[in-house]
Every structure is written in structure tokens, then in C-alpha cells.
């Protein structure tokens, strides 16, 4: 459970940064967008995200296999997450914690810094647009930044604290943010804001109302 949870979670984390790159190319170099972000490049980016997430998950799952668990085996959490498993273990967990901090800086904070730098460039480009163009661009980017803030904020709050200061209650709350709230927001953020999708939903609702009448 831990292994696959980490694969999907880290893949989602990295894809959010890839989406920032996609928006940067679309806004800063719109005429070259089709050639830069072509199907081959997108495929390589997605494959790269999957490979990195698998290696990341194998590393942490392998380290957890060396820990011992005796006596109490009840996790005060919704699933087998990293910090609750470390807290439950009766073994020395300093190596695990060190890997979380140092390797996690690359995997989590690296993409986060990349997103920030990407949006700085996007904002500089947007300031050259007309007022109507600015509103449209900021509206599109604002949705993505909302997801970034929720997702990265919750993950940093959970995984970058020492095990000794970890609170199961706080960890459970933050876990709900990046496992439930953020995924539930994705359909609205990335689909329902699309004009074609909204028009299709309106037509569907009209047809259902007419059929009932």
C-alpha cells in the first residue's frame, strides 16, 4: 500500500510541475507551443515522472523493510503513510528521516522551486498583455496555483517535520488535503473551466430537463 501510494502521489506531484512548464510555453512562446510541447515531448515528460516516482518509492519502501515492529501494530492514520510507520517502529529511524529530508528536498522542493521560477517568468510575460489578455491568463494560472498551494503545502507540512514532533491528528488532516480535496478539485480545475466541456454539460442538462417535461 505504501509503495503504490508513493508512486501515484509523487507522479502527481511531478506532473503538477510539468503543467507549469506547459503553461509557461503556452503563454511565453505561444507560436512555438505546438513544436515545443509536441506529443513526443509530452510522452517523455510523463515517462520521466513515472520513472522518478518508482525509484523514489523503491528507495523508501526498501528502507522501511529494515525496520522492526513489535507489540502495538495500530496506525493512527487512514493508510500506511511514512511518518506513522516510522513512529510505530521500535527500530532506529534516523537513516529514514535523513533520507526523507535530503532526498525529499530534491523530489518535492525541487519541482516546487521550479514552479515558482516558472510563474515568475509567466507573470513577467503576462504584464506585457492587454487587460483582457491578462485576466484570461491569470484566471488560467490561478487555478493551477491553487492546486499547487494545497498540494505542496500539505505535503511539506507532513513530510518535512521530525518524527518526534509528528502529530497523528494534524497528519490525518493534511493527508485529507492531498489525498481527497486536491484530487476532487482536479475535475473542476482542469475540465469544467474548459469552454467546450461547459457547453457540453449545459446541453446535457437541457436535454435531461426537456425529457422530464
Image (cartoon, helix red, strand yellow):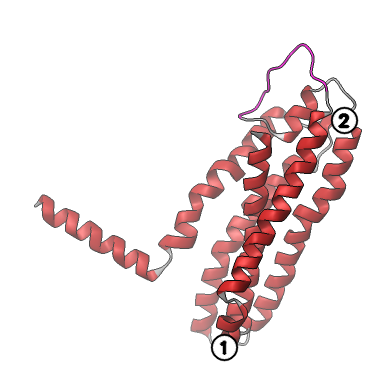
Left or right, residue 3 beside residue 39: right
Residue 132 in the image, given as x and y percentages of width and height: 49, 82
Kindly tell me whether residue 44 is visible in this rendering. yes
Instruction: Decide which of tag 1 and tag 2 comes sooner along the chain.
Output: 1
Q: Quadrant of residue 72?
A: top right
State the residue position of label 1: 31
- For disc 2, the neighbor class at 10 Å (few under 14, some 14 to 19, many from 20) is some
Q: Nearer the viewer, residue 184 or 54?
A: 54
Residue 39 — which label?
none
Q: Is residue 172 covered in magenta?
A: no
- In which quadrant will I find the N terminus? top right
Q: Nearer the viewer, residue 113 or 135?
A: 113
Task: Classify 191 as above or below 39.
Answer: above
* Rendering coords of residue 168 (x, y %): 70, 28
Residue bearing the label numbered 2: 93
SS of the residue under disc 1: helix
How far is disc 1 from disc 2 in space, using C-alphas?
A: 52 Å
What's the magenta bit mostly, secondary-structure-wise? loop
Q: Residue at x 67, y 58 (%)?
A: 49
Which of 62/148 is in front? 62
Chain part drawn in magenta:
68-78
Amino acid at each position: 500500500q505504501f509503495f503504490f501510494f508513493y508512486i501515484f502521489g509523487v507522479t502527481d506531484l511531478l506532473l503538477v510541475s510539468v503543467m507549469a512548464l506547459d503553461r509557461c510555453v503556452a503563454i511565453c512562446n505561444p507560436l512555438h507551443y505546438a513544436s515545443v510541447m509536441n506529443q513526443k515531448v509530452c510522452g517523455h515528460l510523463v515517462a520521466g515522472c513515472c520513472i522518478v516516482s518508482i525509484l523514489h518509492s523503491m528507495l523508501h519502501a526498501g528502507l522501511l523493510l529494515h525496520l522492526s515492529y513489535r507489540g502495538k501494530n495500530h496506525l493512527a492514520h487512514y493508510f500506511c503513510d511514512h511518518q506513522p510507520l516510522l513512529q510505530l517502529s521500535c527500530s532506529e529511524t534516523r537513516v529514514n528521516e535523513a533520507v526523507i529530508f535530503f532526498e525529499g528536498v530534491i523530489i518535492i522542493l525541487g519541482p516546487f522551486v521550479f514552479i515558482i521560477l516558472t510563474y515568475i517568468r509567466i507573470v513577467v510575460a503576462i504584464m506585457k498583455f492587454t487587460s483582457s489578455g491578462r485576466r484570461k491568463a491569470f484566471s488560467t494560472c490561478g487555478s493551477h496555483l491553487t492546486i499547487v498551494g494545497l498540494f505542496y503545502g500539505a505535503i511539506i507540512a507532513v513530510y518535512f517535520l521530525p518524527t518526534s514532533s509528528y502529530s497523528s491528528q494534524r497528519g490525518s488532516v493534511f493527508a485529507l488535503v492531498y489525498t481527497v480535496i486536491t484530487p476532487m478539485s482536479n475535475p473542476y480545475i482542469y475540465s469544467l473551466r474548459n469552454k467546450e466541456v461547459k457547453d457540453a454539460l449545459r446541453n446535457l442538462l437541457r436535454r435531461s430537463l426537456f425529457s422530464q417535461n
